[in-house]
Image (cartoon, helix red, strand yellow):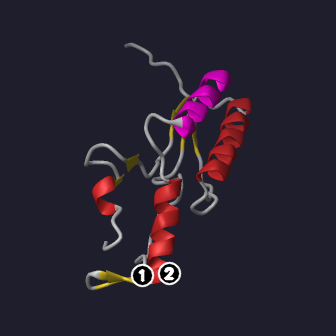
Amino acid sequence: MSSFPTVKVAVIQAAPVLFDRAATVTKTINLIRNGASQGAQLLLFPEAFIPAYPRGLSFGMVVGSRSQEGRALWQRYWDNAVEIPGPATEALGDAAREAGVFLAVGVVERDTQFRGGTCDASQHRENY
């Protein structure tokens, strides 16, 4: 009978700083350090943790049109989505390496070149 190594996993139940990528990355780095200091080897964060899961938000959309408030909220969501690779992923990777842990963080990715990201450039139009 073979034995398998034990891996200590931390499932992080935390709230992001709503639609604030920089603040949420900073919070995530602090949670990484905290989890590592308690012996976690793998840290799992929630779905769409950065910049936040927009559950229940319609972005002001009413059958093919948007309100100005909805457009402003969508712009904030877009502006705080994560480019991969980019500064946010670099900071998270550096923190994981420094802490000696593996990391899984759900992000809303912003794709400015190709279609297929969570938020792609084709969705970011004035008439959306």
Say above or below: 114 vs 93.
Answer: below
User: Looking at the image, is mark 1 or mark 2 earlier in the sequence?
Assistant: 1
Residue 40 location, x and y as percent? 63, 32
Say above or below: 88 vs 7.
Answer: below
* Residue closest to the eye, 86 or 36: 86
Is residue 3 rendered to the left or right of residue 30? left
Helix, strand or loop for disc 2:
helix
In the rendered structure, does residue 97 fall within the stretch colored magenta?
A: yes
Say above or below: 99 vs 30.
Answer: above
In the rendered structure, does residue 8 fall within the stretch colored magenta?
A: no
Q: Residues within 10 Å of mark 1 (few under 14, many from 20)?
A: some
Q: Amino acid at mark 2?
A: Glu
Kindly tell me whether residue 87 is visible in this rendering.
Answer: yes
Residue 89 location, x and y as percent? 52, 36
Q: Residue at x 45, y 34 (%)?
A: 85
Q: Residue at x 48, y 65 (%)?
A: 75
The residue pinned by badge 2 equals 69
Which residue occupies the extreme front position in the image? 126
Q: Residue at x 56, y 36 (%)?
A: 87
The answer to which quarter of the image holds residue 100 is top right
- Marks 1 and 2 sit apart, C-alpha to C-alpha, by 7 Å
Start-end of magenta stretch: 87-101
The residue pinned by badge 1 equals 60
Which residue occupies the extreme top position in the image? 2
Magenta span dominant secondary structure: helix
